[in-house]
Image (spheres, helix red, strand yellow):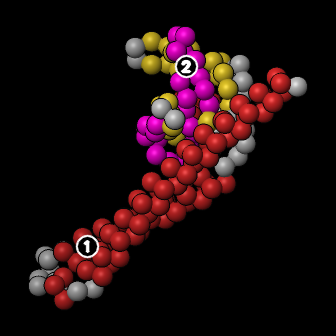
Amino acid sequence: MARMNKLIDQKKNKMKEKIIILEMLKSKMKDQLREAETAYEKTAEYTKSEELRAESKYDTRGVEAGMLAGAQKKRVDELKQDLELLEENKKDIQLGSLVELEMNKIKRKYFLSSCAGGTMLEIKGEAVLVISVFSPMGIEMIGLKSQDSFTLEMTSGNRDYTVLNIS
């Protein structure tokens, strides 16, 4: 019975870590979304100003500002989509999985996300690296189960990983 309680406590702790990571990522993404929306709104408003009225056929300030506003709008849409994907969060080794891997007897934790790849988070004094599901490592990890292995080809040589835990 004590062993079962210990396993339950371990599972709860892993779920808490995952929730903390998700909340930290969502917070960062929401901040980025607010910044992108503000930049888009300012640029969109600026494109309508008298200051950008073309003074000659070679004056392209208005066109350039419009292109910038379009790119900023696209970024806003991408951030909204990324946030939606984070909120869906599946329970298997897919988007939203917290995975502990071993490589060369070194254990590290990774969080699979649709965005913010390369972000390093610290949870309870432990480093967790956010990996994009679109990265080579993320693509290899999708669908794996505990104790599965995979190899990443690197210019410096192959790296062999083993999945230790998934939450």
Q: How many marks?
A: 2
Q: What is the crowding at mark 1: few (fewer than 14 residues within 10 Å), some, or many (at least 20)?
A: some
Furthest residue in direction bottom, as rendered: 50
Q: Is residue 75 highlighted in magenta?
A: no
Q: Is residue 117 above or below residue 101?
A: below
Q: Is 45 left, or right, of 151 in this rendering?
A: left
Of the numbered discs 2 and 1, the one sitting upstream in the chain is 1
Residue at (81, 30) in percent of width and height: 5
In this view of the protein, which residue sits in the foreground, 116 or 62? 116
Would residue 155 appear left or right of 51 to someone viewing this image? right
Asked if residue 84 shows in the view, the reply is yes
The C terminus sits in image quarter: top right
**On the rendered image, what quadrant is the N terminus found in?**
top right
Provide residue 38's location: percent of width, then percent of height. Answer: 35, 71
Kind of residue at badge 2 = Lys
Q: Main secondary structure of the magenta part?
A: strand
Label 2 sits on residue: 107
Report the residue at 62% width, 31% height from top.
Answer: 99
Q: Quadrant of residue 53?
A: bottom left
Residue shown at the point (77%, 28%) measured from the top left? 7
Q: Position of residue 147 (x, y in %)?
A: 71, 19
Q: Residue at x 11, y 83 (%)?
A: 56
Is residue 70 visible to us here? no
Residue holding disc 1: 65
Q: Secondary structure at mark 2?
A: strand
Q: Nearer the viewer, residue 107 or 58?
A: 107
Question: What distance separates the C-alpha of mark 2 from that of mark 1?
Answer: 48 Å
**Magenta region, residue range:** 99-122
